[in-house]
Amino acid sequence: MIVLAWIISFAFPYPAKCTREVLLKMLREFAAEWPGWETFPWRITRDIHQLIDDPPVNFHYLMTQFWLTAYACHVVLTETFASQEDLLDMMIRERFEFVGVFRHHLITALQYLRDQEGKAYIPDCTGIEEGHLGVTQEELARRRRVFREAVERGARETVRVLNYASQATDMNKRVSGRTLRAWAQGDDMPSPQELQVVLSQENGLTVISPTREERAQFARVKKTIPRLLVHGLSAQSLRRPEEPGTAAPLPTVPDPEVAMPPEPKPDVAPPPSVKLAKASIIGDFMGIRFGTEVVELSNRPKPRAFLRFLHKRLANSPERDFYVEEMREAFNAEIPDSHAKRRWTSDRFREDLFKGLEQKFDLLFETLDKSSGHYRLKF
């Protein structure tokens, strides 16, 4: 194994000399990496709105770009077009950034889904195997269904743009709010990003896995360690960090500098030990004493009610970690409509629910991953 830089980019790597046959071969190789809905990496849906719009550069972002590119190629190969020959010729001539078109329409479709759900985020479709215990199997199936429908809606809009472009004589014609030339150039695609990853080979495929640092982060929140198995074309994104433009051969033996334990299957890392803070709950959560410091809650009914609920809910959880969105939904579900004003409806945890108590917040909670709303109760 060896640590190298992987280029995360939504740009399609058209070769200098591209023919229909060459392009079809490339599309088929990339499309073969589409995992299908049965094995879709649902874990990325927790932060999908960030991962495709304003992404942090991490392994989940790589997974998002990976499946999105594969699915876009799958769409080009399997959907019905006015003429596939015209489509391929247009893509070669214009170097058409069709993955960027799909990304754009997927964002729009997911924003529509978010609005339909009446929430400030995309419904989390993570399964119980990844620690998502806050929803029923029926609700999880519903969330996955509407997410899939959003992806398919984005694909239909992508096909529409490609169909117009394949038959157009003027690339300045406007379709879906912008010119065909702007679609072709991928005007709103994010810049390529470099991510440090660990690479090896397995059965002729390139294996990509997170670095030791990112593995530790997954272990900390009790997540399985993700891996990607890729074909030769995707491996073109491999670069040596010290030689940004030079492809590197993949090693077949461990590198002692970064040697890591073998992973025959995506495994669950052992959970860390959690030492709870010594705290005294005053009355019915009127306050919480940590040594000489007291978090005063007597005049804060909503955070007091939420802390009482949370403490009871996590009483049998050795890790005490939770996702804010899940707990907010569960908390609000216990409050009858006749007392709807007691529900917590704001989006921000520290800044809204614990407004005025920000200085005491870190006594109560450990922030595991703020972007995904992942925290740990400390007492």
Image (tube, grey):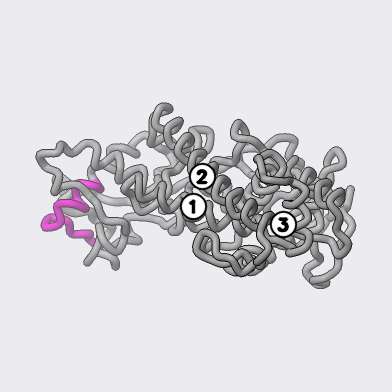
Residue type highlighted by circle 3:
Val
According to the picture, the residue beneath numbered tag 2 turns out to be 153
The residue at 85%/58% (across/down) is 18
Which residues fall within the magenta stretch? 293-307
Disc number at residue 47? 1
In the picture as drawn, the residue positioned furthest to the front comes out as 169
Q: Residue 305, position in %: x, y? A: 19, 46
Q: Give the amino acid type for the residue marked by disc 1 in the picture.
A: Asp
Could you tell me residue 174's position as x and y percent? Answer: 55, 65
Above or below 52: residue 146: above
Residue where numbered disc 3 is placed: 197
Residue at 30 percent across and 42 percent down: it is 329
User: SS class of the residue under badge 1?
Assistant: helix
Q: Is residue 174 left or right of residue 328?
A: right
In this rendering, does residue 10 appear at all?
no
Left or right of 259? Residue 337 is: left
Mark 1 neighbour class, 10 Å CA radius: few under 14, some 14 to 19, many 20 or more: many
Q: CA distance from mark 3 to mark 1?
A: 20 Å
Nearer mark to the viewer, of 3 and 1: 1
305 magenta-colored: yes
Residue 232 can be seen in this image: yes
Residue type indicated by callout 2:
Arg
Image location of residue 164, percent across then percent down: 62, 55
Q: Earlier in the sequence, mark 2 or mark 1?
A: 1
Q: Quadrant of residue 263?
A: top right
Q: Nearer the viewer, residue 237 or 291?
A: 237
Secondary structure state at the residue bearing disc 2: helix
Q: Nearer the viewer, residue 27 or 264?
A: 27
